[in-house]
Amino acid sequence: MRSIVMGVLLFLLLFALVPPLSTPMTLTMIQSQSLALALLPFFAFWLLRRRLYQ
């Protein structure tokens, strides 16, 4: 289960650092970057909470 969470975290990191090539405009690239960067702290907090309660 922890490997799945780490895979999702790595996917979000790659999605934040490298915007998808299918987005034609830079505005959608900035929106996808900000969305991924906004989701990262929630995943990190959830992973930390799971590790503390196990």
Image (cartoon, grey):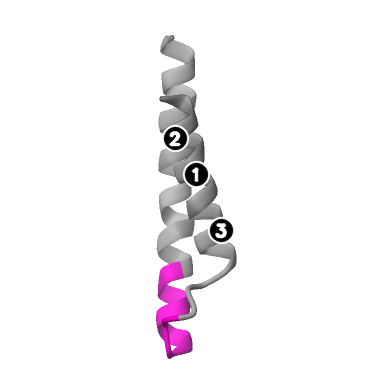
**Is residue 31 on the magenta stretch?**
yes
Across and down, in percent, residue 8 comes to: 45, 44
Check contact, mark 3 vs mark 2: CB within 8 A: no
Name the residue carrying label 3.
Answer: 14
Distance from label 3 to label 1 (Cα)? Answer: 9 Å
Across and down, in percent, residue 49 comes to: 43, 22
Q: Label 1 is placed on what type of residue?
A: Leu
Judge whether 41 appears above or below 17 on screen. above
Across and down, in percent, residue 20 comes to: 47, 73
| Other-residue count near label 3 (Cα within 10 Å), few / some / many at <14 / 14–19 / ≥20 | some
Q: Quadrant of residue 53?
A: top left
In the picture, measured across the screen, residue 10 lies left or right of residue 43, that is: right
Q: Label 3 is placed on what type of residue?
A: Leu
Q: Nearer the viewer, residue 36 or 10?
A: 10
Image quarter where the N terminus lies is top left
Name the residue carrying label 1.
Answer: 9
Q: Earlier in the sequence, mark 3 or mark 2?
A: 2
Check contact, mark 1 vs mark 2: CB within 8 A: yes
Name the residue carrying label 2.
Answer: 5
Chain part drawn in magenta: 22-32
Image quarter where the C terminus lies is top left
Q: Label 2 is placed on what type of residue?
A: Val
List the single residue furthest toward the right. 17
Judge whether 4 appears above or below 53 on screen. below
Q: Residue at x 49, y 79 (%)?
A: 21
Majority secondary structure in the magenta region: helix
